[in-house]
Image (cartoon, rainbow, N blue to C red):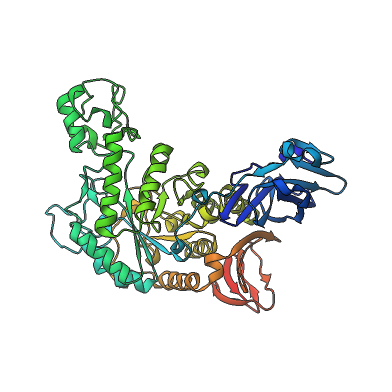
Amino acid sequence: MNLQAICHRPKSNYAYAICDNTILIRIRTAKGDCKRVRLVIGVKHKWADKETYDMEKTASDHLFDYYQFSYQVRESQLGYYFLISDDTTTVVYSESGFSQKFDDENAYFHYFQYPYINEPDVHKVPEWVHKAVFYQIFVDRFARGNDGFQADLRPWGELPDPHSFYGGDLKGILDKLDYLCDLGINALYLTPIFKSPSNHKYDTCDYREVDPMFGDKETLVRLVCEAHKRGMRVVLDGVFNHCSWYLPQFQDVLRNGDKSKYKDWFYIESFPITRYSEKEVNDYSRPLDLSNLNYKVFATSPNMPKLNTENREIRQYLLDTVVYWMREADLDGWRLDVSDEVSHDFWREFRKVVKQENPDTLILGENWHNAYPWLIGDQFDGVMNYPFTKSAIETFAMERKNAADLAADLSGYLMQNTWQAQNAMLNLLDSHDTMRFLTWCDYDEEKLKMAWMLMFTYVGMPCIYYGDEIGMSGKGDPDCRRTFEWDENKWNLDLHEFVKDLIHIRKKRKSLQYGGIKIYTEDEVFYLYREHREEKTLMVLNLTQKTIALERGWKCALTTRKFEDGNMNSTSSAIFYL
C-alpha cells in the first residue's frame, strides 16, 4: 500500500459542512491502490458509541482516487479515523499517522476531529446558481441602442483594434432582452460599465457614474428591472484591484505629490511619480520602458495604478460604492476583476458587506488557477472556471487529451473545492480575454457542440460568450471582441438551435442542476453521470474513431450526430435520460 499518497486534512475541502447537519468527509489514496476505505466516526464525548461506514470512491484523477462519505450529524463534536485496505493489509489512518490498531483508550490524542459546525462558517451560495445559464456581454460590442451618440464610432462589423469604439450600450442590451430570453438565458454578466476612457472599461475613473457612452444610472436601473421581469439576473464587473490614471484621487497625487491626502490610496514608492505621455501609454505597437516606474500598476500598464485596499479610506470608498449600486440598481452579483491580486482581508470584508445587504448576491472571482483559498465560504461563492476551459481546449481544439485525460482533469477539479463552491463556478469555453472556442477548433462546429455538451452537463453555471451561439469567431484580444452580427441571414442557425436545445435541457433536468456527479471512462469513451432523487442523466462523449453500442433503456435528449443502427457514431456526443 502506498502510504505516502494517502491524504486527509480536517476542516478543509477534505472535511467540511454542507449545511448545519451534514459533514462531507473525503480521503485521497493512490490510484488503483486500495480496495476498501471505511470511516470510523463518533461524538467525542460518546466515543464508545462510534460507528463504521463504507466510503464510496467518487472520483479519480491522474494520480489519485478519492473516497467520500456524507455524514448526518446529530451532535457535531466529532472524532474520526479511517480503515484503509488493499488486497493484503488494513491500516488505521488517524491524526497520529498510520498504525495497525487504533488506541480507543486515548482516542482524544489520536483521532481527526470536526469540533463544531458554526453556522456562520458554512458556505452558503445563492440558491439561484443551480438554475443559472449565463451570457457574457462585452458592452461596447453587443448592440447599439443610441445610434450616433459618439461621432468617432467605427462602423459596426469592422474588425476591432485595441482602441476601437463601436457604440454598444445598455440601451442596446435592453432592446435585446427578448432575444436573450428566447435563447433561454436567465443570467447576464456585463463587462465594466462605469466611467472609463477605454472601450473595455477595466480602468475606472469614476466608480459612482455609469460611463456616458453606455448610458446613465436610470438606464441601468431600467435594464435590471426589465431583466428581472423576464426572470434574468444581472451581474456587474467590479474592478477593485486597480483604477484609471484619470481617477480624480490619482490626479490629485500627481499634482500634489506627498502632500496629497490620497497618496496612501496607491502603492507609491517615491515622489515625484513617474510620468508618461498619453501617447506613450496608449501606443501598443512598442513595449513601454518601465525601468523607472515608481508606483505599482496592473500588469505592465502605467495607466492603471494599483489600489491600496488596505488603506481604510479607499476600502470604505469601494465598499460604499458596492452598496450604493446594489441599492440603486438591485444588482444580483459581482464579478471581481484580477481578484487573486487583492488581499484576502479585503475580500472577507467585501463578502460581509455584500451578503449583509443581500444574502442572495453572487460573488464571483476572476481566478485563472486553483482558487481554493478564496472558496472556503468567507470570500467568493465561485470563480471563472478557467481550468475547465483549459481542459476543453486541450481535448477538443488541440486534441492533446483523450477521454481518460479529460475525466481525470474534471474529477480532480471537483475534488479541489467544496460542493457548494463547485456549484457556483462559472464554466466557460471562452471570454473577452481568450480566443473564441470555434476559432480554437479551426471552425469545426462538431467540436464546439461536444464542448458545449460537456459544459452544460458538468457541475457549475454554464456561460455563453456573446455571439458564440451564432458562430462568431475571433482570435485573441482584440479580435475576440468583435461586434455582434445582428443580420440573421449571417447566423449559423444550426449552432443557434443547438444551444437553445441545450439550455432547455439544462433548465428542465433537476439532475443537471442539483445532482451528484460521477465521471469515468470505458473503452476510451467518456461518461458523465448525474443523479438527483429518481432522475438520471448521462452524457456520453465518444472521441474515438469507432461506433459504440448504446445501453438499452436510456432515451436520447440531444445528440451532435444522428445515430446509425442504434449505435453512437465516432467523434460525437449525446445526452441521455431515464
Screen quadrant of the N terminus = top right
Q: To which quarter of the image does residue 177 belong?
A: bottom left
**Location of residue 571 in the rendering, given as x and y in whole percent from the top left corner:** 59, 64
Q: Nearer the viewer, residue 151 or 131?
A: 131
Q: Is residue 428 left or right of residue 85?
A: left
Q: Nearer the viewer, residue 422 or 524?
A: 422
Screen quadrant of the C terminus = bottom right
Q: Nearer the viewer, residue 314 or 456?
A: 314
Give the residue at the far left of this rendering: 151
Visible residue check, residue 305:
no
**Location of residue 51 in the rendering, given as x and y in whole percent from the top left corner:** 76, 54
Q: Is residue 38 left or right of residue 187?
A: right
Query: What residue appears at the point 28 percent right and 63 percent down from the top-left corner?
Result: 224
Query: What residue appears at the point 17 percent right and 37 percent down from the top-left corner?
Result: 248
Q: To which quarter of the image does residue 198 belong?
A: top left
**Location of residue 75 in the rendering, given as x and y in whole percent from the top left corner:** 64, 53
